[in-house]
Amino acid sequence: MIKRIEYPFTEEKVRALRVGDAVALSGRIFTGRDRLHQELADGTASPVGLRDGAMYHCGPVVMKEGDGWVVRAAGPTTSMRQDPFMPRIITNLGVRVIIGKGGMGEATRAACRENGCVYLQAVGGAAALLAASIERVEGVHFLQEFGPTEAMWELVVRDFSAVVTMDTRGRSLHRTIERNTRKNLKMLLEG
Amino acid sequence: MKKAHWEKNLVELIRRTSTDLPADVENVIRRALGREKKDSTAHNFLSMMLKNAAMARRESVPLCQDTGTLSFRFTVPTGFDTNGLASLTRSAVAKATRLGYLRQNTVDSVSGELYVTNVAPAAPLMTFLQGARKTVDARLIMKGGGCENVGQQYSLPDVTLGASRDLEGVRRCVLDAVWKAQGRGCAPGVLGVCIGGDRATGYAHAKEQFLRKLGDRSEVKVLARLEDRLTRDIRKMEIGPMGLGGKTSSLGVKVGTLSRLPASFFVSVSYMCWAFRRRGVLLGPEGGVHRWVY
Ligand code: SF4
């Protein structure tokens, strides 16, 4: 069963999600990588409102076409690098959905529980498929300063596929799997 | 050298590598899909990977937006102009970037500035070997940062792993590397392993294993057995696609060896994500295509 969620991603909507849920996300999302997270966490004003918004850890391949932009490839990048910045961005700017890969650490897990924010794991490497769920590029910020990979792309998506792996109850599927697989590893090393 | 021919076909090599998942890899993913429970996350993710591969191929777009480090390996006839080939390869990379087959993906390590053409010191990487054939054998591997970051190198003996200087010690290292990687290298990936060498050649040889087809087995009996054993063991780990659990934690294990010094015993493990980008082509003296490899 796929749960559909649409922008704005209100507290009520994200608190209804549970670890393991498959979701199809629609509406406005923003991309951001290391440069953007650092700036936002350091207090640089966001050029757009992020309240009830979604931050996608992604550095897309974008081509200029006529006056606009077309995203050719847009899979998730590793989220863990943003772990030092994410709690401040969640708390101060009101981001409620994080999309990325690999999950995030304890600080972000706590911030998700306290503020009502979820982490979604998208399929890493599925760049063509995920790009196909992008309906259009609404705009781009910090393009000059950060370059196209690190820029903040404003995208409108339709049925973007992902799985909830950290929820508002403080559960993390990444942690659970790490624990379970550690047991399996131990068994394999003993056997 | 007919410059235009060479450049065109080198761009085509890059395009195919970036957009067209090799059949051997796709088949292994398809078989893995059959083992996962329907409607599970593992099943959903593997089928999305296959859909992504089909779409990237059909629309000629990158399989993954991280188009990675480009490593070319050229085997050329005696007396061949490798400097000429190197500069043609660089211009092919710049062109493939303009065409959107490669992301602007190369950064100066100190200033943080972007090399917009992906041509920079040591980018692309090129190795030239001399071969007996009249054609140039050009192979390309593109490897992204996510999986590169989870590679591991061990110096045996390793007390915490209980790994001594033997094949059982190697097995322990590889299992440890797979566990540490979890889903972060975009599991299920392929493990390239090198026993021996030094710190530099160990990793290089581990990566060279990615030129082998997934279906082949090491010609050295004990290594072939180790590859099989590790493939079975890793399945029992249940890391699953993207590290969210499931039976498919890797697509295969390839083990090679180099000689070593008596004082050193390195085990180098390189991880290649499921978006396994590897292609090759045999090019004639004028740069025309003789045959595509893989
Ligand atoms: S590790 Fe993941 S994100 Fe990186 S190149 Fe591979 S598939 Fe893409």
Image (spheres, rainbow, N blue to C red):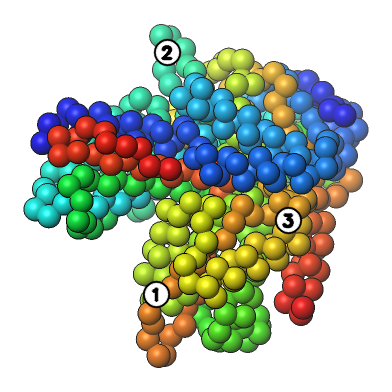
**Residue that label 1 marks:** B258
Instruction: Tell me if mark 1 has few (under 14), some (14-19) or many (20+) residues whose alpha carbon lies within 10 angstroms of its own.
Output: some
Which quarter of the figure is the C terminus of chain B placed in?
top left
Instruction: State the separation of the CA atoms marked 3 and 1.
Output: 30 Å
Q: Does mark 1 fall on the same chain as mark 3?
A: yes
B37 over A30 or under it: above or below: below
CB within 8 Å, label 2 to label 3: no
| Foreground: disc 1 or disc 2 | 1
Position of B209 with respect to A79 (left or right) is left
Q: Chain of mark 2?
A: A
Q: Which label was assigned to residue B239? A: 3
SS for callout 1:
loop
Residue B185 in picture, x, y percent from top left: 59, 52
Residue A37 in picture, x, y percent from top left: 58, 41
B7 over A7 or under it: above or below: below
Residue type at numbered disc 3: Ile
Please tell me in which quadrant of the rendered image residue B167 appears: bottom right
**Residue that label 2 marks:** A65
Q: Nearer the viewer, residue B196 or B229?
A: B229
Instruction: State the separation of the CA atoms marked 2 and 3.
Output: 41 Å
Q: Earlier in the sequence, mark 3 or mark 1?
A: 3
